Amino acid sequence: MRMTQSGEITQMLAAARAGDKVAWERLVRLIYTDLRQLARRVLGGSRRDQTLNTGALVHECYLRLSRSGAIVPNDRNHLFCLAARVMRQVICDYARERLAERRGGGVAPLSLESFTAQEQAHVEQFVELDTALTELARHDERQARVVECRFFAGMTDAETADALGISLRTVARDWDAARAWLTRNYVPA
Amino acid sequence: MPIDPNFLTPGGALQSPLLGRALGRMGEEASGPELGAQIGPYQIESELGRGGMAVVYLAHRTDGEFEQAVALKLVRPEGNSEFAQALLRQERQILAGLQHPGIARLLDGGHSEDGQLWFALELVHGTRIDRYCRERRLPVANRLRLFLQVCAAMQFAHGRLLVHRDIKPSNILVTYDGNVKLLDFGIAQVLDSSSSAAPSNYALTPGYASPEQLGGNAVTTASDIYQLGRLLQSLLQPAPAETDALTQTDSVAATTLLQPLDAAHTVDAIAEPPRDLAAIIRKAMQAEPAARYATVAELSGDIENYLAHRPIVARHGGAWYRGACFLRRHRLVSFAAFATIIAFVAMATMFTLRLANERDQARMAAAQARQEAARANQVRDFLVGMFEVADPNVNRGDKLSATQILERGAADIDKALAGQGPLQANLLVVIGEVYSSLGDYPRAEPLLERAVLLQRQNRDASPVELAHALRLYAFAEHKLDKFEQARALLDQAEGLLRDRPEAKSELAAVLDQRGLAQKHLNDLEGALASHRAAQAAARASLDEGRIAVVDNHLGLMLYSLDRYADAQVVYEEALEVARRRFGERDTRTSSIEENLAVVLSAQGDFDRALQSMLSAAATERELIGEDNGDFPQTLNMLGNIYADAGRNSEAAATYERALAVDQRTGRGESEDAASTLSNLGSAYAELKRYDDARARLEQAVTIRSRLNGPDHMEVAHTQTMLATLDLDQQQPQLAERIARQVLEKLNGKLPPAHRYVADAEIVLARALLAQKRGAEARPLIESALAKVAGDDATVKQLTQMLAELPKTAAGQSR
């Protein structure tokens, strides 16, 4: 006897997941579009020090997606998590490349951008944080997700709780724990 | 360098100056054709510039007809690209005939394979008009003469009844011999008319759009006059115009926008235009189109009057450009508010635009036109009112949330638009939909209910709009668990749409939604019929997104009814559509293939299931790579098919591969990995590699306990599997103890008839039988038997266990 029905359960879950991927594939692309639009607004706009509320951006993005029929609206929370992850990837990849450029690596610098001391410090911080977060996710994936939502997507406690399907208290606890771990305990290898 | 606690704060990444740079770089990397690529009869040579939605390349003709360098502009339309293409074909003829030295000619246009529109424009070497003025520090008179050139070109176009719609500095170049060239004539027209969202995304440049454009009304030559006034204003006041307009530009000169403003730009500003010029600007930019200059000739005539020191015609016009300048007045609006407002205006515009179109078709009389203008103003005032909430002077500097703005809008809608049934209804729909999309169904419900009511009362309301409102209302009801209500509303919507071939996509959405409601009401037959009808409508609509969603719901419905063969037909058809539309090598196609494989496997057609899953996996790996996306889950499903087919060593190898990818990508401790581990444990048990099996299952328990807590049902179930291992290794007492613990954990958590409970009961029964305690085992077997109906193999196994009982039980009872 096959000892379990777990395979079948997995299949059912996977079927739903796989089914949604048609939409999810489109969705990832659409999020990139929205982030590019954001870029246009930031750079085409007037104030370079503008603080951005990505929550609103994600809302807007979500509106457009749900209007286009691309996803069923109860996937909204997934979208928020995904957006946070995309934010992380966009900015950390950028920082990583800048750091690699600065360190040479045998490649001619691609960008002629000059950085202020603060920007240079941020480049290093983002790279450290990205590495540390990946490490953290190995110990506690949820904590890493909380950091993505709070730090990278600027979501509030409540938005994060909704997005990850956990309680407010857990969000606060995870954020504090992750923050302590990332800022104190993390020693780069 | 350790991470600075001051850096790691909520929203910290968004405040970093690096974000803007990273996003900017991302914009640069926006996918586009490679250099040397062929677009229509043109070959791309180099990139000239980029804006938010468009890239402009230097290109030349390659079909040997004649050598011609052009500026090739590629735009991705936001709306219906097929419609945009049709419109482009129609407009191209007219625009090609627009020959004037001040207008860069549109030479050709078409669409690429992936739906992008391309426009071949006369190549112009020059400088943006505002830069030109600034860099040469031109005196006012010279600026006005350049402006007159722009007017001459516009007058020529208006004489041919062509409207530009998007006049702004970035669309006007000055050549090196001092001649003005207008770019992008007619492009806004094509993009604007094709897309419901376009006014906000393309043609509507904040700071340059006329009030009627913002209000979503028919755009006429009067809008161009408004924009000319705005242009004149910016030429005379370069600095504020530059800082205020959140320009979304796509011209050859677009690159200049991506550069930061330098201090010199502001030094050169002409502080205050002379009073007469201010009056001219004011008259051109009157909120009411009828109050502006009637023709471009009148406007340029006044400029000439000014240059010749004659009295000008323009005189004061009252409360001027109230609507147009709101962005400037409220420039401290938080980004949150801004993004929401843009989304909101886009939707509101869409509705009013649609109304305007319908009326155009009906050839409205002048009286009606005035009435419409009045309505448009009401809508605009209403929207402006919503902006004002975002004014820091009004809200004391707090950043506004989207919800606050919506609340204010919802509260004011009755007051502001009293007696305007259709407009009121449309705005209620918009706000209701926004709430729904934000997941706030209790707030959405009453708004949508009222919208439906208002539309019913209005005899002129289009049935399609009413159906749309009904669907949104039904969706909110569905989300509030009022399934009966939702179904009734959707029945009405279906009735309205039944004989309307133009609304097939909406009909498909209505039927799809009804199917979901019926499923909740346990009307499975009805649900299936609705999903099937939705499928037919979606196919007829040619709306790819809709087809994908609808097919998937239908397939899952059939799958959950255990109607695997029918689900197979759905997915086979869907696959055919996807292959045709998206091609073989596309992840949308491959994910349908995966679904098909699952369904085939459920029917025991393992060979074809494997073939489909392997093909899907290959596509996925090729397009996305192993380390991205859900590749390990695809491998997991592939492993399941091998396991179901009894090919356990191949299954185990596949699961191991999935785990290796999970490990490599930092997902080794995820729920997905745990599920693969427990499947792998299963496969090893089948192969009698008990130690390997035990190690994997224990790992799965550890991960799942950490993720979900030690009492979670998946943890319990994995422990059932471990108990089975104990049985296989002749440890019935150990198995008994674990199985009892599992049943205790599951008790009360799951419905008593849940399969996991049955599995635990079976293991416990077997453990008891192995200890010759048949009497205790019998009720467990009977209880399990009641839960596994439909699983023939298990029913057979349990029946056999029961049949063998009496002897043992009798022996035991004596």
Image (cartoon, helix red, strand yellow):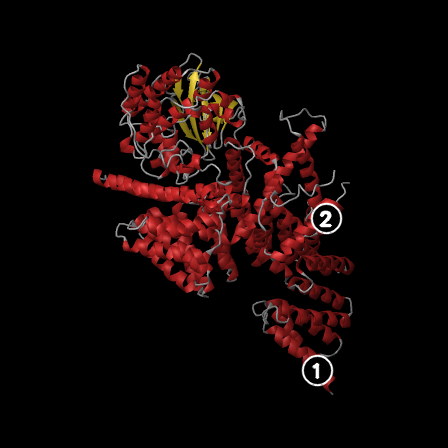
Of residues B153 and B286, the one drawn nearer to the viewer in this rendering: B286
Instruction: Pick out the residue farthest to the bottom.
Output: B814
The quarter of the rendered structure image containing the C terminus of chain B is bottom right
The residue type indicated by label 1 comes to Ala
Mark 1 vs mark 2, CA separation in Å = 60 Å
Question: Disc 1 sits on a residue from what chain?
Answer: B
- Give how far across and how far down residue B725 sits, in percent: 74, 65
Residue at 73% across / 64% down in the picture?
A: B722
The quarter of the rendered structure image containing the N terminus of chain B is top right
Relative to B477, is A31 above or below?
above
Q: Secondary structure at mark 2?
A: helix
Q: Quadrant of residue B155?
A: top left
- Give how far across and how far down residue B732 sits, in percent: 76, 71
Whether residue A14 can be seen here: yes
- For residue B435, the mark is none
Of residues B302 and A153, the one drawn nearer to the viewer in this rendering: B302
- Give how far across and how far down residue B704 sits, in percent: 68, 58
- Give how far across and how far down residue B520 sits, in percent: 47, 63
Residue at 62% across / 73% down in the picture?
A: B784
Count of numbered tags:
2
Horizontal side of A72 relative to A95 (left or right) equals: left
Residue at 76% across / 76% down in the picture?
A: B771
User: Are there few (<14), some (14-19), or many (20+) residues within 10 Å of tag 1?
Assistant: some
Residue bearing mark 1: B809
Observer-side mark, 1 or 2, equals 2
Of residues B694 and B672, the one drawn nearer to the viewer in this rendering: B672
Residue bearing mark 2: A181
The residue type indicated by label 2 comes to Trp
